Amino acid sequence: MDVHFGSAKGMPLVSENSRTLLIVEDDPGLLSQLKWCFEDYDVCTAEDRQSAIAELRRREPMVVLQDLGLPPRPEGVEEGLATLAETLRLAPHTKVIVVTGNGDQENALTAVGQGAYDFYEKPVDTETLKLLVDRAFTIAELEAENRRLQSKVNESPLDGIVAASEAMLAVCRMIEKVAPTDVTTLLLGESGTGKELLARALHRLSPRAGGAFVAINCAAIPENLLESELFGHEKGAFTGAHKQTIGKVEVANGGTLFLDEIGDMPMPLQAKLLRFLQERVIERIGGRQEIPVDVRVVCATNQKPDDLIAQGLFREDLYYRIAEITINIPPYREREEGRLILARTLLQKYCEKQKRSLNGFSEDAVRAIESYSWPGNVRELENKIKGAVIMAEGKLVTAADLGISAVDAEDESLNLREVRQRAESKAIRVALTRSFGNISRAAELLGITRPTLYDLMNKYGLSAEGYSKKTAS
């Protein structure tokens, strides 16, 4: 689900409390001296690039103290600079202090330009070097804490839901307003947009939170079994009914009943559901007794109710009964402002579950996430990230790890007309969201007149109804 914890690019996804220092030095005497100097830290050592990268992966040090002159050519700096580059690629938040030869300031500045935190020239003065390392740890810990706090900035007040885009914030506001009431609510959205998660949020924020949350997928149960599943049956009601069975509606008594994919409910059963919603009583199959049930009903569908009604597949009177409040859930591809934040949140979630240490997404993964069409919505994103956490070999998840190829990720058009139309459409949607569909207020936010806004809304097929205080999109 659009479910939210913003973070800076490359946000670390593991605990950064360990004060581990990696010393990369090929001189045994100097290495021994440095180990003694930094005995207050958890020190690990390496003598060349291969062993340094191995220790980096294994120990995840906050700070690296690295000589620029490394084997196989310790008189040069090429191997040292290559080690620095690979270190920062795998662990971009690591503070690397490079140690250079006397008078070798030019190479030291080159290293800093490539991302090193600081440099120090030999001969080594341990007290000065210790100050540099202590400061590097302090800065690294402050930055880690800042990233941790920043990751909470966009956290939704609804547990488990990332609401980092304007559209999802509007949805969350609706959920919070509707939850304390008993009105029957209809959630509209494509498959994989998080309808059940929002239904659970409605239950969790309601006075019925102590009761049961009972979900039933109307599309997953055969028509001849769905009535019994909903309303239950008496012993002997039909062949195979060997005992009395309580239906889902009764099980949800005092709590919330979630009817997912209600658009697939058979017409005969729709009439019985309508009667229940009107009178709040049920009869088990084969029974004669009317049983009162106190339950809050939340429905969801990925279909368009108007189309179903026009095709004679859904009762219009039932639609009005289940849609006392309608909440439209935007697809993942339309959550532009929060798309990457949600991806990072899911990455953090699955890194913790899989006990893996990853630093975020690579540049090509970021571009792929932002440009891919995501036909499966958040569910597809979640599955791809779950697999990427298992498959990733480096510290950053790549587009290849996600299984999104360059062909899948559509190149963003630079056609000025298309760019302007996209920007106009998005600005109008944001303004309507912020104003809850109030045309005058939205026009004021956009700096245009009401007639102009109406013209633009017609142009882009937008309706204020989808953003009113009774609905959200």
Image (tube, rainbow, N blue to C red):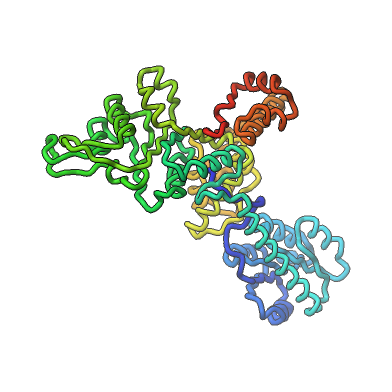
The answer to whether residue 161 is left or right of residue 442 is left
Can you see residue 61? yes
The answer to whether residue 258 is left or right of residue 194 is left
User: Could you say which is closer to the camera, residue 443 or residue 156?
Assistant: 443
How far across and how far down the image is residue 36, in percent? 69, 82
Residue 411 occupies quadrant: top right
Q: Residue at x 72, y 75 (%)?
A: 27
User: Could you say which is closer to the camera, residue 40 or residue 97?
Assistant: 40
Q: Residue at x 57, y 65 (%)?
A: 58
Residue furthest to the right in view is: 103
The answer to whether residue 249 is left or right of residue 395 is left
User: Could you say which is closer to the camera, residue 441 or residue 4?
Assistant: 441
Identify whether 221 is placed above or below 352: above
How far across and how far down the image is residue 262, in percent? 37, 32
Identify whether 403 is placed above or below 23: above
Q: Residue at x 54, y 43 (%)?
A: 172
Quarter containing the C terminus: top right
How far across and how far down the image is residue 379, in percent? 47, 41
User: Could you say which is closer to the camera, residue 6 or residue 180?
Assistant: 180
Q: Residue at x 66, y 32 (%)?
A: 431
Can you see residue 189? no
The answer to whether residue 461 is left or right of residue 210 is right
